[in-house]
Structures are given as structure tokens and as C-alpha cells.
């Protein structure tokens, strides 16, 4: 059966290590879209942290953001699906996180917020385990992020817990998985992400299928990180790029070249354009 929808993770997958979408990837998307295939970005980023490339590529119509907590029609600039944390989950998360000393971010209505002291520290020192430019451009600093989350408890798409010391991550994971009405995932080595009880890229992909009348076996998903695994299981064709985590590669139907070798274009060419 032919592929009618291609769901693409962004960081480490569609974006290369120079933090851009290559011309070959763009061309492959355009050719697939010309055949009537829906090109969908499926990312852990919130809507307003997406790179400008995404909004400029005509082939991309929809964006599943914040690990599937939101779906937006980019052309219409309309968010038509939300799957946020419950107020209970937000309250329990705040109670737990306040007892620890990690860098916390939260996503609300497509905007990423971060603790103000950390934002100022990055500005002052010019050091961070992530791209400094990305953080300063896409995050809004808050004086009290916990108070903000409680005041917006019905609209929290995601809570991001960041670890400078990776040795602390496993113990915190064991605490986070006990939170009520949540799912815990990770999009890169230094973080754990708290989402709603049914929030995932897979659930958002199911919603897309219902909206567009597309079956699972007519979908292809491409990713690299643990937060992509549910989406890859949901799709008829699961593709991991060559730089993906081993657990992602192990459950994929096909391993494409790396994100720096146009792995997304390779997958589209193989399963959509040549298929």
C-alpha cells in the first residue's frame, strides 16, 4: 500500500548537525507533497520554537508539537488539537520538582518558558550543554516558573527537566514515573519530559489519521530518540536515521543514513518516491 503521510521528527532527524534542513531533504518533501503525500513535522519542540525553515517549506502543512500535545495547521495558523497535562499532574509535578535543583522548562500554548536565573546565567557565562543561541531565542525567562505552572495548570503541554550531571537522571526518572496521570519520555541525553497521560507523538498521529482518512499502514515515521518510539510503532513503516539511539534502531523497520547524510530524503525517496 502506498504511503500517504510522512511524519518527521525534527532535531537529530530532519535537521542536520549544522541546525538546518538540507536542500535534498526539502526537495524530497516537495516531490512527495506533489504526489499528494502529507508531510507532517512531529517534534518535542513547542510551536513557536520551530525553525523558520519549517514555516517556509510549502510541503509542510501540519506540525505535531510538544511531543504530540498540540497539532497545528501551519497554513491556516490554527491549532485544532490539544492534549495537555491534567491539573492534578501539574500540581504533583510542581510538588516533586520544587524539592530538587534542576533546570526546568514548561511549554504553554506553543511558547517555551524557562527559569529566569538560568537564562541570565547563560547570557552572562555563554556556556550551556545545549545551543546557547537556540535557548536565548526560543525561551522566555520567568522569575517563578512553579507559580506560573500552577496558574496555567490547565494549559501545560510539557514540563522539561534538564540535567547537567547525567548521573542524576536515572534516579529522577524513577521518581517521575510515579507521578499521576503522566507519561515520561526523553528527546535528548540531558532531559526527561513530563507529558499528559495520553500525550505522545503516536496519539497525535492517530488524530491526524482520523482527520485525513489515512490508515496506519499508509504512514511512515522517521525519528532518532526515545520520544519518537511510540510514533514509529504507530506507523506502517518505521524508519530510524543512522545516528538514532540503539533502542530506536532496534525497533525500526529500516535504518536510513544519518541526519547529516540526508537520511530523511533517503527514506522518502525509497518508500514514497520509488515505492
Image (cartoon, helix red, strand yellow):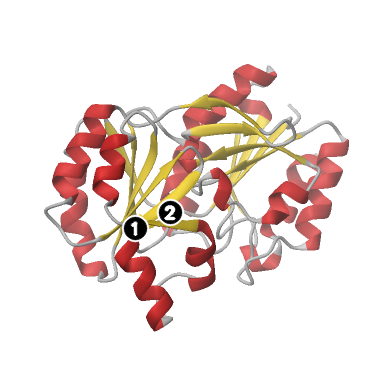
- Badge 2 element: loop
Residue 263 rendering spot, x and y as whole percentages: 67, 58
Q: Label 1 crowding class (10 Å Cα cut-off): few <14, some 14-19, many 20+?
A: some
CB of mark 2 within 8 Å of CB of mark 1?
A: yes
> For residue 16, which quarter of the picture?
bottom right
Of 44 and 4, nearer the camera is 44
Image quarter (top left, top right, bottom left or bottom right) of the C terminus: top right
Indicate the position of residue 63 as horizontal and vertical percent values.
62, 38
User: Residue 160's spot in the image, x, y percent?
Assistant: 34, 51
Alpha carbons under labels 2 and 1: distance apart: 7 Å
Q: Secondary structure at mark 1?
A: strand
| Residue 170 vertical position relative to residue 127 in the rendered view, above or below | above
Q: Is residue 7 left or right of residue 181?
A: right
The residue indicated by pointer 2 is 187
Q: Which residue is mark 1?
A: 191
**Measured along the vertical axis of the image, is residue 125 above or below residue 147?**
below
Residue 124 occupies quadrant: bottom left
Is residue 80 shown left or right of residue 233? right
Residue located 51% across and 45% down the image: 46
Quick check: 274 left or right of 113?
A: right
Residue in the picture at 21% in, 41% down: 93
- Residue 101: x and y in percent read 18, 62
Amino acid at each position: 500500500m502506498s504511503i500517504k503521510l510522512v511524519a518527521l521528527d525534527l532535531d537529530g532527524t530532519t535537521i542536520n548537525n549544522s541546525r538546518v534542513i538540507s536542500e535534498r531533504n526539502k526537495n524530497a518533501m516537495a516531490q512527495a507533497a506533489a504526489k499528494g503525500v502529507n508531510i507532517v513535522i512531529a517534534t518535542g519542540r513547542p510551536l513557536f520554537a520551530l525553525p523558520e525553515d519549517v514555516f517556509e517549506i510549502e510541503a509542510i502543512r501540519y506540525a505535531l508539537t510538544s511531543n504530540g500535545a498540540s497539532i497545528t495547521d501551519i497554513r491556516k495558523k490554527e491549532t485544532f488539537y490539544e492534549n495537555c497535562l491534567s491539573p492534578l499532574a501539574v500540581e504533583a509535578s510542581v510538588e516533586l520538582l520544587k524539592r530538587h535543583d534542576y533546570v526546568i522548562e514548561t511549554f504553554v500554548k506553543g511558547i517555551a518558558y524557562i527559569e529566569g536565573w538560568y537564562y541570565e546565567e547563560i547570557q552572562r557565562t555563554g556556556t550551556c550543554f545545549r545551543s546557547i543561541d537556540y535557548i536565548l531565542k526560543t525561551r522566555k525567562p520567568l522569575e517563578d516558573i512553579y507559580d506560573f505552572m500552577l496558574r496555567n495548570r490547565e494549559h501545560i503541554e510539557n514540563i522539561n527537566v534538564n540535567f547537567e550531571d547525567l548521573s542524576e537522571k536515572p534516579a529522577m526518572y524513577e521518581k517521575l514515573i510515579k507521578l499521576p496521570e503522566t507519561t515520561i519520555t526523553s528527546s535528548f541525553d540531558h532531559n526527561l519530559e513530563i507529558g499528559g497521560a495520553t500525550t505522545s507523538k503516536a496519539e497525535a498521529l492517530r488524530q491526524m489519521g482520523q482527520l485525513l482518512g489515512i490508515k496506519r499502514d499508509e504512514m511512515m515515521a522517521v525519528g532518532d530518540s526515545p520520544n519518537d518510539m511510540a510514533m514509529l510503532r504507530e506507523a506502517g513503516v518505521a524508519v530510524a536515521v543512522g545516528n538514532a539511539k540503539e533502542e530506536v534502531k532496534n525497533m525500526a523497520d529500516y535504518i536510513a543514513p544519518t541526519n547529516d547524510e540526508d537520511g530523511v530524503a533517503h527514506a522518502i525517496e525509497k518508500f514514497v518516491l520509488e515505492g
